[in-house]
Image (spheres, helix red, strand yellow):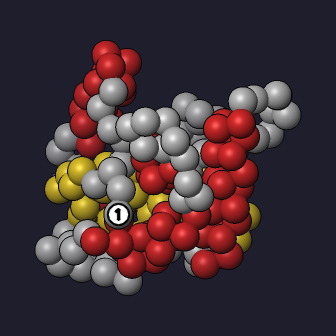
Amino acid sequence: MILLTGGSACGKSAFAESLCTSLPLPRYYIAAMKPYGAEGEERIRRHRTLRRGKGFETIEKYTALDELTLPGRGTALLECICNLTANEMFDDNSTFCDPCEAVIRGTMALAAQCNNLVVITNDVGADALDYNEGTRAYIKAMGSINAALAEKADTVCELVCGIPLVLKGTLPE
């Protein structure tokens, strides 16, 4: 399992897709972003365009990742832990619960089904701004999830300006 982290729009997706194209087929893209509003739809369209021709089978799974069964082994790209966490944490009534167990369990269940799992997450909480209760709970959950996944991952990289900085392990050649 390779965990890629970094700030928003730092090149994580492009790097992850490139990395996955060097790893064994079949290739799955696990999309966790729910398509909310025009901005969300545009972001999803952009990501689909970036993946075109790279051999990914897209599987949309917004919650309960542990219930997903891949059709075969190979390489999976999970995009992204931030969306999966928000989906698990907040229901349609804006009430929230602790998503940590569900996200970690689901990610590890996915890892057990493939030869290579590349997981994208964001570095959150570094700005130290004052947020509402729900956002603070989300940032705390993301911190816990990222730390747990980093511990379990073989390789952890932070992307800065599209450049991978290996924090743990090694990247595949």
Q: Nearer the viewer, residue 53 or 140?
A: 140
> Would residue 25 be seen by someone viewing this image from the given angle?
no
Front one among 41 and 72: 41
Q: Which residue is mark 1?
A: 64
Q: Residue 149, how many percent across, how many down?
A: 60, 69
How many numbered discs? 1
* Image quadrant where residue 113 sits: bottom left
Q: Secondary structure at mark 1?
A: loop
Report whether 162 appears left or right of 39: right
Is residue 27 visible from the viewing direction of this image? yes
Compared with 82, 108 (above or below) is below
Looking at the image, residue 57 sits to the left or right of residue 77; the answer is left
Kind of residue sitting beneath label 1: Ala
Which residue is drawn at the image coordinates 17% and 45% (left, top)? 53
Q: Position of residue 173 (x, y in %)?
A: 49, 70
Please, is residue 49 above or below residue 21 in the view? above
Give the x, y percent position of residue 9: 55, 31
Displayed quadrant of residue 153: bottom right
- Above or below, 123 relative to 39: below
User: How far across and down, in percent of the image, does residue 38 sit?
Assistant: 31, 16
Q: Which image quarter: residue 98?
A: bottom right
- At x 39% / y 78%, what residue is drawn? 109
Q: Nearer the viewer, residue 95 or 51?
A: 95
